[in-house]
Image (spheres, rainbow, N blue to C red):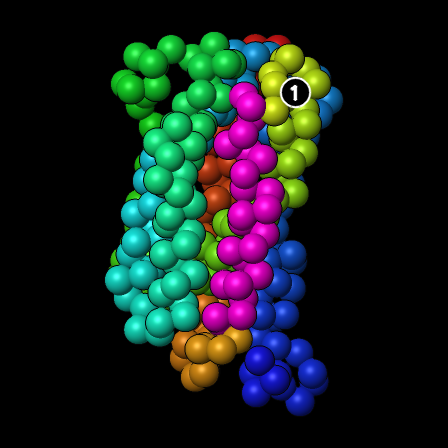
């Protein structure tokens, strides 16, 4: 870690976090939810589209793992993948958890099984697959570990609180959100450590910066489209 520090005393991970903060955005969905502007039907729409991304998330992690030559980074990715699969407990598989939350919001199994993704949902999923599969493992760590997982704990914790308060959901109903509060915080922290350790060349660092910027841009378009889709359900 110390070798990764520059003459300014900053790590490469500090630069990535600063970039993420500067290019980050406020999700309009949460703002509307916090102000009581979204109905249960609207939030159900959010959960259904989010479930389509969650269903594919293990593929993103697997792709980074396949491209990663370092044993300690592989270990982190394997742990992440195991957690996504509920550590062997099918009922706690993350896709099953978000389905359970969506059903408590009013979705049926049929709705979840046949849900059509928004164009922006498809673009988001395809972008995540492309950057993790076709980019180097450094770019994958930056895109997923920083671009997605570093934002999840605060957003999901606040979202869980609002869903319980406004729609009478229990902690068990929002377990999908709550498990990410601790898990994603750990994943993001350790991903940053891997980036500091293995992003050695200027080219690798530039790939990481660009992967992060691209991910934030795609995620923003997805969030804005998803909010519009939810708001159309009415208050």
Whether residue 32 can be seen here: no
- Count up the numbered dots: 1
**Can you identify the residue that label 1 sits on?**
164
User: What is the quadrant of residue 99 in the picture?
Assistant: top left
Whether residue 90 can be seen here: yes
User: What is the quadrant of residue 200 in the picture?
Assistant: bottom left
Residue at image x 41%, y 79%?
A: 203
Give the magenta part as a residue range: 172-195
Q: Is residue 48 above or below residue 123?
A: above
Of the 4 image quadrants, the one containing the C terminus is: top right
x, y (%) of residue 159? 63, 30
Residue at image x 65%, y 43%?
A: 154
Q: Is residue 197 above or below residue 124?
A: below
Q: Is residue 32 above or below residue 27?
A: above
Q: Is residue 27 above or below residue 194?
A: above
Disc 1 element? helix
Of the 4 image quadrants, the one containing the N terminus is: bottom right
* Residue 160 shown left or right of residue 63 in the figure: right
x, y (%) of residue 151? 59, 48
x, y (%) of residue 84? 40, 43
Residue at image x 60%, y 42%?
A: 181
Q: Is residue 189 magenta?
A: yes
Residue at image x 60%, y 16%?
A: 169
Dominant SS in magenta: helix
């Amino acid at each position: 870690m110390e070798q990764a520090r520059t003459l300014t005393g900053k790590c490469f991970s500090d630069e990535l976090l600063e970039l993420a903060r500067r290019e980050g955005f406020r999700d309009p969905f949460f703002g509307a939810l916090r102000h009581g502007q979204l109905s249960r039907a609207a939030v159900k729409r959010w959960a259904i589209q989010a479930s389509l991304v969650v269903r594919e998330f293990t593929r993103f992690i697997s792709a980074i793992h396949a491209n990663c030559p370092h044993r300690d980074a592989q270990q982190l990715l394997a742990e992440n993948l195991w957690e996504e699969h509920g550590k062997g407990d099918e009922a706690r598989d993350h896709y099953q958890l978000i389905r359970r939350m969506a059903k408590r919001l009013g979705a049926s199994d049929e709705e979840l099984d046949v849900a059509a993704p928004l164009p922006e949902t498809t673009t988001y999923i395809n972008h995540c697959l492309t950057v993790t599969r076709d980019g180097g493992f450094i770019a994958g760590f930056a895109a997923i570990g920083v671009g997605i997982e570093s934002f999840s704990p605060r957003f999901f914790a606040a979202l869980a609180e609002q869903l319980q308060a406004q729609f009478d959901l229990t902690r068990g109903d929002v377990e999908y959100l709550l498990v990410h509060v601790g898990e994603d915080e750990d994943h993001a922290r350790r991903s940053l450590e891997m980036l500091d350790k293995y992003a050695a060349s200027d080219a690798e660092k530039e790939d990481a910066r660009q992967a992060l910027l691209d991910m934030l841009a795609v995620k923003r378009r997805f969030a804005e489209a998803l909010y519009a889709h939810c708001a159309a359900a009415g208050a």
